Amino acid sequence: METVKQVMTDANLYKEGSKEELKSSFIEEETVELGGKTYTLSKIAYYDAKIFADEMDTILARQNPLIHDVFARNAVNMFDLVRMVNTNSKQGFKGAQASGNELDFNLFMARQFQDPDGAVQTRRTSWVRNIASVGAKSFFEDLAGAVADAEQAMGEEEGMIWLAFYNPAQQSCIDAFQITMNTELYDIQALDFEQVQLDMGDVIIEFKEPWTLPPEQSGELRAYYYQTGTDETRPLGIWVKQARNLRALATP
């Protein structure tokens, strides 16, 4: 199994050295294209890249190895997101020791997101969801707005990346999903959890490509529930934010 550190080392985004050496050695600014748009990846110190990789591997070490593997193989995409956000925040990534405008990340938690079955501005209490009728329903939508089933907009100094869906349920309710970003529909993607479960227990289905929602862009994700029951599907990904926006324990 690969680690975040190894993947970033192979991509020349991680190197060993003293704190002083790594703080004065930089990954240069570059650009990347996502969804037909070009985004700037900021210049950032190798010290920040080391913090990111080491902390990511630390928090994933006791997870399901398949989950660790998903994050590790997408390490470059995740760190690209950090650099996109840093283009605006400009204070670098300091992880658990971050303060002020410095950047940190969280793995996705249910209560970070709007409850698609509740009133507007109601947070999820769980990824578990009772499905009473079949059809297309919102899975990820705007939390802060006054209209249900709308795109979630990222702030100037935040962004998220979605890597895969994990489903510990014995029976799946979802068989497809579709992303909308900046009002543009993406192609549907299959989520055939039942096929994967022929060979293993808890299952993970990765996105064809990681979905990055950069700063100041908006997106929504809808799923097709082909049968009723209890849905336990949850996303794997990270939300990058400034430390000053990660200081309220009740609202991460």
Image (spheres, grey):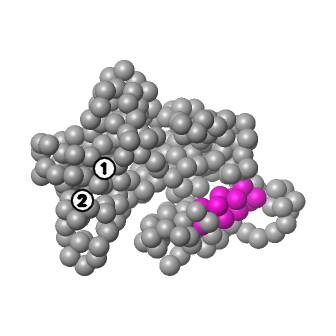
Indicate the amino acid at tag 1: Val
Residue 93 vertical placement versus 252 (above, below)? below
In terms of image quadrants, where is residue 186? Answer: top left
Q: Is residue 37 visible?
A: no
Task: Identify the residue at horizontal 38%, vertical 30% (top origin).
Answer: 122
At mark 2, the secondary structure is loop
**Picture disc at residue 191:** 2
Compared across the picture, whether 65 is left or right of 20 comes to: left
Picture coordinates of residue 199, whole percent (x, y): 25, 79
Q: Magenta span covers which residues? A: 46-57
> Which of pointers 1 and 2 indicates the residue nearer the eye?
1
Indicate the amino acid at tag 2: Leu
- The one nearer the camera, 214 or 57, is 57
At mark 1, the secondary structure is loop
Task: Identify the residue at horizontal 19%, vertical 62% (top origin).
Answer: 171
Picture coordinates of residue 114, whole percent (x, y): 38, 35
- The one nearer the camera, 214 or 32, is 214
Picture coordinates of residue 118, whole percent (x, y): 29, 31
Residue at the spot of label 1: 128
Q: Closer to the N terminus: mark 1 or mark 2?
A: 1
Q: Is residue 115 magenta?
A: no
